[in-house]
Image (cartoon, grey):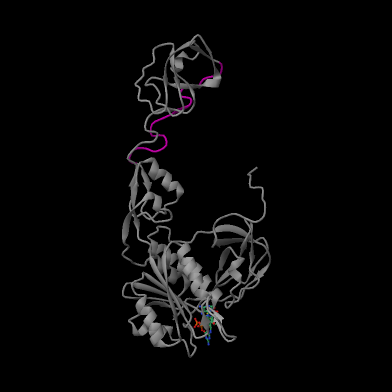
């Protein structure tokens, strides 16, 4: 029995997996998922320091000529106390004297006989960067399950943290079966086709942060498929495609079953991709996608990516979306939740024209999907829709004015 989309998603949200971890240098942690809570061990700034090259003064003295009694550079460790009508020359980043309550930028002073006069209005505490105003001591900086990106590296390095605990990359094994299939580097006959699904899922699983192994390609026989499955069982997830429907040569399901496969779901009430099967042999999850190239990739984008988020240890396991407008009137056959690929230009979503389940060309020009409720029959031009990005570096080939005015 095919499962509803909601039930399928609930199963994925609640998947269980013991995730291994490793401790690695932060330089190697980009795109990895943090497996610990990281708290600050230093306040930042560590001490009150100057935001300008200029003079540190006592605010109450600002309208007097002030004698320059010392100079402090960034990195100096001087404990200075200002007397009445004195100031110190100070550099950006240098420690502010204990009782200094304003910094005067150099260009707002006139210096004469080692005394400065201030030429502009002064506000109390101006240009002082106060201890802890950026990061407080003991503040939670990175949560378990968050992805490390360049900005998290900023946090870690600013705290002098050299190594962190991250979840191990999920091991993903990919293979395909089908007598008609050949790999892209093989010679093919007129009656054969290239296997495009396996390279697709290898590439996508790598993009999503997995350690991926290509296991090979089985002939359409139970024995051949069984061998591939057995060789893949040290993976956390096997992704395979094809052989799930009812054709006479669809042996994949049978091969899995003879190896103790426990189905978690068998079929999803979705279009395309209904014959998707998901289950487990021992500790290895198995996602058996339909053979049709577009069907398998779309179903993977909606469900497979979330399975991978779970296996990565990410706390972001739900789809987010962007509101957009439909670029044209659109008709849909109602009855099943439907995934429509298309192109989002930053404002409008244009459904891909060619999008039948067996096509391979569609996603190369799409960058997002919309998922239509089973009752949707029509969407009007300009109607508000929710898009799920599938290619999320937001650059464009078209020159655009991106300034908010
Ligand atoms: N009588 C029925 N026939 C079909 C049904 C059905 O319910 N009743 N469902 C259709 C749907 S929906 C889909 S999707 C496909 C699923 O078929 P399989 O998953 O068993 O896949 P195959 O039969 O092996 O192949 C389908 C199609 O995809 C091509 N293919 C397969 N693997 C690859 C690959 N690695 N790279 C590129 N192309 C691949 C294959 O050549 C076929 O054209 O079943 C429908 N039929
Ligand atoms: O999974 Mo099939 O491609 O729905 O048509």
Residue nearer the viewer, 355 or 155: 155
Q: Position of residue 104 (x, y in %)?
A: 50, 21
> Does 296 lie within the magenta span?
no
Q: Where is residue 310 in the image (x, y as percent from the top left)?
A: 39, 63
> Does 127 lie within the magenta span?
yes
Q: Is the magenta stretch mostly helix, strand or loop?
A: loop
Q: Is residue 369 left or right of residue 72?
A: right
Taking the spot 39% from the left edge, 26% from the top edge, the residue there is 95
**126 to 148, vertically: above or below:** above
Taking the spot 32% from the left edge, 81% from the top edge, the residue there is 260
Residue nearer the viewer, 77 or 392: 77
The residue lying furthest to the top in this view is: 113
Which quadrant holds the N terminus? bottom left
**272 to 329, vertically: above or below:** below
**22 to 4, vertically: above or below:** above
Q: Where is residue 214 in the image (x, y as percent from the top left)?
A: 43, 72
- Which contiguous range is marked in magenta? 119-138
């Amino acid at each position: 029995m095919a499962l509803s989309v909601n039930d399928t998603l609930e199963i994925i949200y609640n998947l269980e997996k013991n995730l291994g971890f490793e401790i690695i240098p932060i330089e190697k942690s980009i795109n990895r998922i943090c497996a610990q809570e990281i708290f600050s061990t230093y306040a930042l700034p560590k001490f009150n320091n100057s935001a300008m090259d200029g003079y540190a003064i006592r605010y109450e003295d600002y309208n007097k000529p002030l004698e320059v009694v010392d100079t402090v550079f960034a990195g100096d460790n001087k404990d200075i106390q200002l007397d009445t009508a004195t100031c110190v020359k100070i550099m950006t980043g240098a420690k502010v004297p204990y009782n200094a309550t304003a910094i005067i930028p150099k260009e707002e002073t006139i210096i004469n006989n080692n005394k400065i006069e201030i030429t502009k209005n002064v506000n109390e505490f101006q240009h002082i960067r106060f201890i802890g105003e950026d990061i407080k001591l003991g503040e939670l900086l990175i949560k378990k399950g968050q992805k490390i990106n360049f900005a998290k590296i900023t946090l870690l390095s600013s705290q002098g943290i050299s190594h962190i605990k991250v979840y191990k990359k999920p091991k993903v094994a990919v293979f395909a079966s089908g007598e008609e299939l050949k790999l892209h580097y093989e010679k093919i006959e007129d009656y054969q086709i290239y296997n495009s699904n396996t390279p697709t899922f290898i590439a996508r699983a790598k993009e999503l942060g997995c350690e991926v192994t290509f296991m090979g390609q089985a002939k359409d026989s139970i024995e051949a498929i069984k061998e591939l499955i057995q060789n893949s069982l040290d993976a956390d997830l096997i992704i395979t495609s094809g052989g799930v429907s009812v054709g006479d040569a669809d042996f994949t399901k049978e091969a899995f079953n003879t190896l103790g496969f426990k189905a978690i779901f068998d079929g999803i009430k979705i279009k395309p991709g209904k014959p998707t099967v998901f289950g487990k042999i021992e500790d290895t999850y198995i996602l058996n996608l339909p053979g049709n190239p577009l069907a398998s990739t779309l179903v993977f984008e909606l469900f497979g990516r979330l399975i991978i988020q779970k296996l990565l240890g990410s706390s972001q396991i739900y789809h987010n979306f962007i509101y957009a407008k439909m670029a044209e009137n659109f008709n849909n056959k109602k009855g099943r939740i439907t995934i429509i690929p298309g192109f989002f230009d930053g404002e409008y979503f244009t459904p891909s024209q060619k999008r039948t389940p067996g096509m391979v060309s569609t996603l190369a020009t799409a960058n997002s999907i919309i998922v239509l409720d089973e009752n949707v029959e029509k969407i009007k031009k300009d109607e508000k829709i929710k898009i799920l990005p599938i290619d999320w570096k937001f650059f464009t080939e078209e020159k655009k004015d991106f300034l908010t005015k």
